[in-house]
Image (spheres, helix red, strand yellow):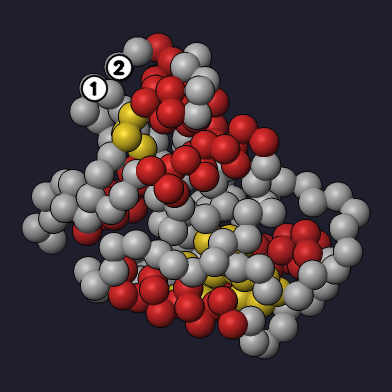
Amino acid sequence: MTNSERDAERDSRPATSPGAGPDATPDAGRTPPRDWGWARLETPIGPLLLAATREGLAQVVFHADERTSRRALVRLEQLFGSAPLPEIPHLDTATTELTAYFAGELRAFTVPLDWSLTSGFNARVLHALASDVPYGSVVGYQDLADRVGEPGAARAVGAAMGANPLPVVVPCHRVVASDGGIGGFGGGLETKRLLLALEGVLPAPLF
């Protein structure tokens, strides 16, 4: 593993990940209120909190117990400038597709995505990841930096993975170290192992 990849792995850990922690989303500034809603989904990797706007799925939060969910919802209400609504159509689509994914019945998500909680270089990297790294494959931090035309940015790619607001659907679990290690992950390494095992990249755990 190169020094830049070690830095990338460290930067992909959960300290700044909105997928792993609800307090780390970008500052939306003063924007008009937006309609949004949320749902919690039980999955083999633990409960996920899903938040969507009328544009699409906007955030996925790992380990969404009551405390984590409460903090995430307060932050999202601040970001979107309004209280959540009971029905947002994209939530149903996201819930259905994630349920099918975890059952091994879905390999590509079609739910529309709202990319408003990411921007700049991070958004470029995450778009490339979503479009170019399919189910059952992996990519290195350096390789992903090369794909977006920033060959010296492996560490920044790690930071972008750690700040991914849409983990699982935008598959930052597929970004690994060049030495064969699985790299860091905002949702925790065990969660990353389970996702890679689900997709056949790693052997399924025995227990």
Q: Earlier in the sequence, mark 2 or mark 1?
A: 2
Q: Residue 123: tell me if it is visible.
A: yes
Where does residue 151 sit, x and y in percent of width and height? 47, 17
Residue 1 image label: 2
Where does residue 4 sit, x and y in percent of width and height? 43, 15
Image point (35%, 76%), residue name? 99
Residue at mark 1: 179
State the separation of the CA atoms marked 2 and 1.
Answer: 5 Å
Image point (87%, 58%), residue name? 31
Left or right: 1, with 172 as reference point:
left
At label 1, the amino acid type is Asp
Image point (22%, 55%), residue name? 199
Where does residue 29 sit, x and y in percent of width and height? 86, 50
User: Is the C-beta separation of discs 2 and 1 under 8 Å?
Assistant: yes
At label 2, the amino acid type is Met
| Label 2 environment density (alpha carbons within 10 Å; few <14, some 14–19, many ≥20) | few
Where does residue 95 sit, x and y in percent of width and height? 45, 77
Q: Nearer the viewer, residue 113 or 70?
A: 113
Quadrant of the frame with the N terminus: top left
Report helix, strand or loop for mark 2: loop
- The answer to whether residue 195 is above or below residue 39 is above
